[in-house]
């Protein structure tokens, strides 16, 4: 029973990391920027979700509100900040890193702004269903209706995302712009807008990750929330495990990370909570720096 | 529709890659631009398709100056550019690469018909329609690159060294296809080539670029017979 429990918890946490990794990958593919502000953007979106839950009373309305809010914030960041930085720092030693350092600055700005607007206190978001574990044969699991719901929602969102990417013209434009921006432009694709769209999708995915991370934890939200630091680190590690360039890689990376952490905590020591993800990251970087998926193969998805 | 380039100058930083180039390609004609490495051929082509900005000069297409128009907008005005070195997206399938060429039309039915048209021109692409394009041979990839370009139903086709790295037999086939397409689709074509003889044989006009300037221009057959061109570029 312990094993099943550990497995299910790992998969649930992993699915949230996958979402976060997907948002890192979407940004990386559209602009070649590692976005350290992704968790900050997710935090801000989750506050939007909190406002919606409070005012409208429904988690299922709040979730799309958070997604749209997250998409808008991300699109604005790309249009105002990143696009200009990428254009203006096209040469010199700072060229490659300026946008990345800017995202670190942005993370600080977002955190400070959220604490100015919502205060440093914790606020609560109540999940749509109970987070009390299922009971089987008298044993109570940690796996709960809420966790099941999270898992299913993430699954549905990923299916939709993969259909969009594989079956629609917008998906084709997103992929072509990521792989060969020049050929995309010569084919008539407005690559600047496609980049903004990539950021917007990333913002929406990050918002869902933020909402679920909050309700899957203790339901509280604050600008200094440890849940969001963990979300940034885990999303980044999951993306790196998956090769940073692949959406499928991001999903698998998230699940692998979630399971590894879950099993380490269960069978080795729960004291390793903050060390395990970093050790896993270092191991991946040493053994397979191109990620689990080879650089070329990863770009398929 | 006529392409007219007047006094075009393009710089790479401080280096002048194209220097005061003027040329005209009348509608429906195939012009070959030949010249050695570094003569400015690719830069000229990239400027025509909007990828590079000229320092000065004018490019007139269909009577309008197109300098400063972005490449994604020039496609909408009938200009298709096939870049150097098999300009396909390796991660996408053959079909997806073709769809890419017509994506701006937002008309999937028209796109489907265009794919059928391309496949009738290049049956090999039909056999490999669902394969990833990095599994194709060099010749097939060049066919795909040209196929993608004609998916957008262009009036002006810019081709950058389609023969690069291909076997002689394949080169001959590609050149023949380019000539056929020019006639059947009534295209205006600018063909940049290091393979001077092959290009001049199918071209109506020939332009020799040397160090960024037009050295010789005239009918392709006159260039083939020109002793100076023969010794410098055709090697006999």
Image: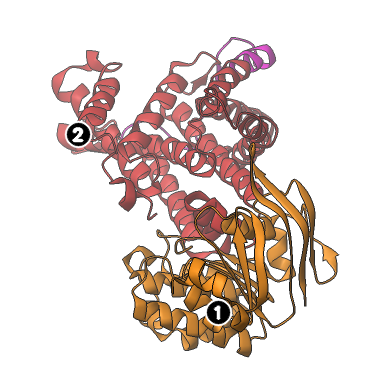
Q: Is residue A268 visible?
A: yes
Residue A159, percent from left and from top:
43, 55
Instruction: Tell me the mark number nearer the camera, choosing from 2 and 1.
Output: 1
Residue A265, percent from left and from top:
21, 22
Residue B83, percent from left and from top:
53, 61
Whether residue B71 sits left or right of residue A161 in the image: it is right
**What number is the disc on residue B72?**
none
Image quarter hosting the N terminus of chain A:
top left
Asked if disc 2 and disc 1 are in contact, CB closer than 8 Å, the reply is no
Task: Name the one closer to the observer, B179 or A172.
Answer: B179
Chain letter for the part of the structure drawn in orange: B
Whether residue B104 sits left or right of residue A147 in the image: it is right
Q: Which residue is mark 1?
A: B224
Q: Is residue A89 above or below residue A167?
A: above
Residue B15, percent from left and from top:
62, 40
As helix, strand or loop, the secondary structure at mark 2 comes to loop
Task: Name the one closer to the observer, A224 or B189.
Answer: B189
What residue is rendered at 29% in x and 30% in y?
Answer: A142
Whether residue B140 sits left or right of residue B19 in the image: it is left
Per the rendered image, the range of residues in magenta is A111-134
**What number is the disc on residue A138?**
2
Query: Around disc 1, counting alpha carbons within 10 Å, would you say few (fewer than 14), some (14 to 19), or many (20 or more)?
Result: some
For chain A, what colour was chosen? red
Task: Name the one closer to the observer, A212 or A175.
Answer: A175
What residue is rendered at 60% in x and 45% in y?
Answer: A195
């Amino acid at each position: 029973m312990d094993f099943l429990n550990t497995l299910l918890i790992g998969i649930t946490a992993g699915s949230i990391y996958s979402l976060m990794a997907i948002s890192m990958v979407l940004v990386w593919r559209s602009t070649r920027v590692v976005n350290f502000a992704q968790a900050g953007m997710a935090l801000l979106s989750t506050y939007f979700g909190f406002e919606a839950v409070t005012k409208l009373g429904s988690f299922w309305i709040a979730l799309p509100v958070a997604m749209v809010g997250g998409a808008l914030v991300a699109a604005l960041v790309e249009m105002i900040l990143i696009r200009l930085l990428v254009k203006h720092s096209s040469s010199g030693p700072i060229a490659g890193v300026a946008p990345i350092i800017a995202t670190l600055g942005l993370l600080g700005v977002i955190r400070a702004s959220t604490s100015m607007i919502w205060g440093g206190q914790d606020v609560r978001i109540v999940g749509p269903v109970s987070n009390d574990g299922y009971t089987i044969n008298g044993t109570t699991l940690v796996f709960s209706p809420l966790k099941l719901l999270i898992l299913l929602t993430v699954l549905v969102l990923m299916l939709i995302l993969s259909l969009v990417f594989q079956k629609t013209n917008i998906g084709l434009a997103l992929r072509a712009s990521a792989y060969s921006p020049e050929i995309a432009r010569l084919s008539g694709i407005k690559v600047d807008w496609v980049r903004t769209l990539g950021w917007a999708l990333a913002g929406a995915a990050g918002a869902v990750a933020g909402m679920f991370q909050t309700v899957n934890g203790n339901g509280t939200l604050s600008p200094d929330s440890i849940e969001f630091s963990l979300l940034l680190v885990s999303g980044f590690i999951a993306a790196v495990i998956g090769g940073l360039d692949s959406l499928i890689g991001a999903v698998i990376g998230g699940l692998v990370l979630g399971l590894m952490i879950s099993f380490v905590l269960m069978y080795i020591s729960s004291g390793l909570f903050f060390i395990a993800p970093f050790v896993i990251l270092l191991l991946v970087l040493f053994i397979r720096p191109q990620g689990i998926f080879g650089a070329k193969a990863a770009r398929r998805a | 529709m006529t392409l007219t380039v007047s006094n075009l100058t393009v710089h790479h930083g401080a280096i002048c890659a194209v220097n005061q180039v003027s040329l005209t390609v009348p509608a429906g004609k195939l012009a070959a631009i030949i010249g050695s490495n570094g003569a400015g051929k690719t830069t000229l082509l990239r400027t025509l398709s909007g990828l590079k900005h000229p320092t000065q000069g004018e490019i007139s297409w269909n009577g309008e100056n197109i300098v400063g128009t972005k490449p994604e907008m020039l496609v909408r005005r009938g200009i298709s550019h096939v870049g150097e070195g098999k300009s396909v997206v390796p991660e996408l399938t053959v079909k997806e690469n073709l769809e890419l060429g017509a994506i701006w039309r937002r008309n999937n039915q028209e796109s489907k018909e265009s794919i059928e048209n391309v496949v009738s021109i290049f049956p090999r692409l039909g056999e490999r329609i669902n394969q990833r394009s990095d599994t194709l041979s060099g010749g097939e990839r060049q066919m795909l690159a040209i196929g993608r370009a004609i998916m957008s139903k262009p009036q002006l086709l810019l081709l950058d060294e389609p023969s690069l790295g291909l076997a002689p037999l394949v080169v001959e086939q590609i050149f023949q296809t380019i000539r056929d397409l020019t006639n059947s689709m009534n295209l205006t074509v600018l063909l940049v080539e290091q393979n001077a003889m092959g290009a001049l044989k199918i071209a109506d006009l020939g332009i020799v670029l040397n160090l960024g300037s037009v050295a010789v221009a005239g009918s392709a057959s006159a260039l083939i017979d020109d002793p100076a061109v023969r010794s410098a570029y055709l090697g006999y």
